[in-house]
Amino acid sequence: MHKRTFKKGTPIFKEGEKGLEAYLIESGKVLIVKKGPTAPVIVAALPQGTLFGEMAILDGSPRMATAIAGEDTVCVVVNSMQMHQRLMSLPPDILRILTGLMEYVRSTVPFDQRAKIGQSLEPTPRDQQAHLMLPTQAVVDGFGLTDPMLKALVRMLCDYTRRRLPPTLVKT
């Protein structure tokens, strides 16, 4: 792992690119931008301690959005081999949970977007399954993770999953 500094306004990666690295924000802020019908749309402003860019290196799919330094930013950079080594060091039960959550996140849209694309707001079987897999904070704390990259990954996957679940299913 190494660190990389990005000046404000500098693209870190672009939507559609192949993902070769993930980033943990050590200082600064990163804007996540998606192509909109008429102009780019900022979908998130990520603070210090946030992991981003991980989905593309975990499952080999193209980048889902563009990441831009929102201010001067320093990131710890991890490549796909390093990330996979970290994941393989996890106990099998934890790895199964994370894999299931990654699959759910990739295959669903956030709950608040479902009506906009004509999807039902009723919980689906996939929602029910993700709800059962989603660990509570007490369970996550019980994982005993010490690696900051893995801690950030678990936190991020849980947050992404909660945003996709119907509110009636969300655990804290």
Image (tube, helix red, strand yellow):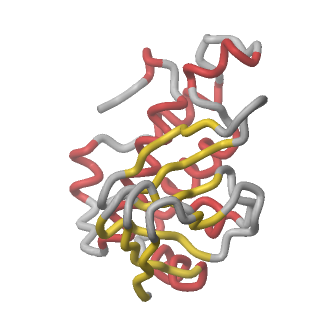
Asked where in the image residue 109 lies, by quadrant, the reply is top right
What is the x, y in percent for residue 66?
Answer: 63, 54
Question: Is residue 15 or residue 96 the one in the foreground?
Answer: 15
What is the x, y in percent for residue 9?
Answer: 51, 59
Spot the residue most to the bottom. Answer: 2
Please indicate whether residue 51 sits to the left or right of residue 33 in the image. Answer: left
Please indicate whether residue 34 sits to the left or right of residue 143 in the image. Answer: right
64 to 132, vertically: above or below: below
Tell me the quadrant of the picture where the C terminus can be found.
top left
What is the x, y in percent for residue 71?
Answer: 38, 59
What is the x, y in percent for residue 113?
Answer: 62, 22
105 to 37, vertically: above or below: below
Residue placed at 49% from the left, 50% from the top? 31
Question: Is residue 88 or residue 55 the one in the foreground?
Answer: 55
Tell me the quadrant of the picture where the N terminus can be found.
bottom left
Please indicate whether residue 19 sits to the left or right of residue 168 in the image. Answer: right
87 to 10, vertically: above or below: below
Question: Is residue 91 or residue 63 the one in the foreground?
Answer: 63
80 to 140, vertically: above or below: below
Question: Is residue 79 or residue 42 the one in the foreground?
Answer: 42
**How many labels, in total?**
0
Residue placed at 64% from the left, 26% from the top? 125
Residue placed at 36% from the left, 60% from the top? 152
Residue placed at 59% from the left, 63% from the top? 11
